[in-house]
Image (spheres, rainbow, N blue to C red):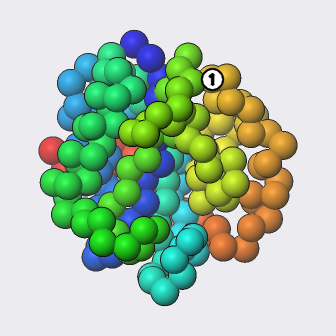
Amino acid sequence: MSGAVLSLGSNLGDREDMLCKALGALSALPNTTVLSTSYVYETQPVGYFNQPLFLNAAVLVDTELSPHTLLGCCLGIEAALGRERNIKNGPRVIDIDLLLYQGVSCTGDELTLPHPRMAQRAFVLVPLADIFPNGIVFEFNFSGQISKAFNDTGVVKYNNLCLDESRVDR
């Protein structure tokens, strides 16, 4: 089994419900266990600004799936939940990004690990710090970016909601 870290985001429809459905689908993947989840944060859009605010969270899983297979499963979950890719960085019912996979570093057309822009995104780093408060995840050290991420006014804890499996319908 290997650890993997995922980022979840939604800014269309019932955003909370979409995050819970995505978590439920991740929990149902073969040979994959959700180990930990972050609080949920409401965040400003990045890249394309004419859209609603996002809800974002981070998830740590333990999996026997390869990084490419896990990515394929995430894309399948997005499609099953109604994700459409019409505008780059545009609004979406669900977004699931594979950020890190324990012991794997790769660069490719389909998958780059660690995720190439995660260290510049407060909406990723703040939830990640809930799970890894020392700022170290596997071989990735983001401790130097934590204080800047927490000072980003575009990231606000969302009603103290913690994304956890107790809220997931099965």
Q: Is residue 162 above or below residue 142?
A: below
Along the line of sight, the residue nearer the viewer: 17 or 136: 136
| Residue toward you, 93 or 133 | 93
Residue 77 spot, x, y in % from top left? 23, 48
Q: Which residue is drawn at 60% across and 59% down?
A: 123
Q: Is 77 located above or below residue 10 in the figure?
A: above
Count all numbered tags in the image, as a single digit. 1
Q: In which quarter of the image is the N terminus?
A: top left
Residue at horizontal 26 percent and vertical 20 percent from the top? 31
Foreground residue among 82 and 30: 82
Q: Element at badge 1? A: loop
Q: Which of 25 and 84 is in front in this view?
A: 84
Image quarter for residue 20? bottom left
In the picture as drawn, the residue positioned furthest to the front comes out as: 109
**Residue at point 37% right, 57% down?**
95
Where residue 153 appears, as percent x and y from the top left, is 72, 73
Q: Mark 1 points at which residue?
A: 138
Q: Can residue 100 be seen in this view?
A: no
Crowd around label 1: few <14 · some 14–19 · many ≥20 (10 Å): some
Horizontal side, residue 23 vs residue 147: left or right: left
Q: In which quarter of the image is the C terminus?
A: top left
Callout 1 amino acid: Phe
The image shows residue 3 at horizontal and vertical percentages of 48, 23
Instruction: Give the percent coordinates (x, y) of residue 168.
Output: 26, 49
Q: In which quarter of the image is residue 134?
A: top right
- Residue 75, visible in the rendered structure: yes
